[in-house]
Image: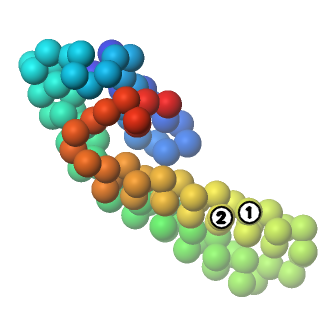
Amino acid sequence: MIDYFTFDERLGIHVPDLMLEWDKYCKDTQQFILLNWERVRGTIPDRIAELEQEINHKQAKLSDESDFPRSCKLNTEIADLASIINDLWLYYRADQTISTKVHQ
């Protein structure tokens, strides 16, 4: 799996990291990549749930926060987590066929 995926620290999952165009891989390699991608995709809803819990925790802190700079920091952290969730949903909903378009 290491040859075809890299761990994205921000997202907390492995993401495709293909060095070739999809059609350049043999069918066995394509199957291997797709099988592993489906395993990764299967973890995405749990990862999203973790991030949503973090957001809820920060929102609870924010509702009691009276320090403006700290409120701004919490808002930024919440927005960052929401952005990660959005990106995870994009990967989750991505077509099962991996292409070089998802190569970063």
* Residue displayed at 49% across by 31% down: 104
For the residue marked with disc 2, what is the amino acid?
A: Ala
For the residue marked with disc 1, what is the amino acid?
A: Thr
Q: Position of residue 65 (x, y in %)?
A: 80, 79
- Does residue 69 appear left or right of residue 18 in this picture? right
* Residue displayed at 90% across by 75% down: 68
Q: Secondary structure at mark 1?
A: helix
On residue 37, which mark appears? none
- Does residue 35 appear left or right of residue 19 in this picture? left
Q: Position of residue 91 (x, y in %)?
A: 37, 49
On residue 79, which mark appears? 2
- Tell me, yes or no, if residue 47 can be seen here: no
Disc 1: which residue: 76
Relative vertical location of residue 27 with respect to residue 84 in this rendering, above or below: above
- Tell me, yes or no, if residue 75 can be seen here: yes
Question: Could you classify mark 2 by the number of other residues whose Cα lies within 10 Å: few (under 14), some (14-19), or many (20 or more)?
Answer: few
Residue nearer the viewer, 38 or 48: 38
Q: Are marks 2 and 1 in contact (CB under 8 Å)?
A: yes
Q: Report which quarter residue 79 is drawn in.
A: bottom right
* Residue displayed at 32% across by 22% down: 21
Q: Position of residue 7 (x, y in %)?
A: 44, 30
Residue nearer the viewer, 36 or 19: 19
Q: Report which quarter residue 35 is drawn in.
A: top left
Q: Position of residue 69 (x, y in %)?
A: 90, 68
* Quadrant of the rendering where the N terminus is positioned: top left
Q: Report which quarter residue 80 is drawn in.
A: bottom right
Question: Could you classify mark 1 by the number of other residues whose Cα lies within 10 Å: few (under 14), some (14-19), or many (20 or more)?
Answer: few
Q: Secondary structure at mark 2?
A: helix
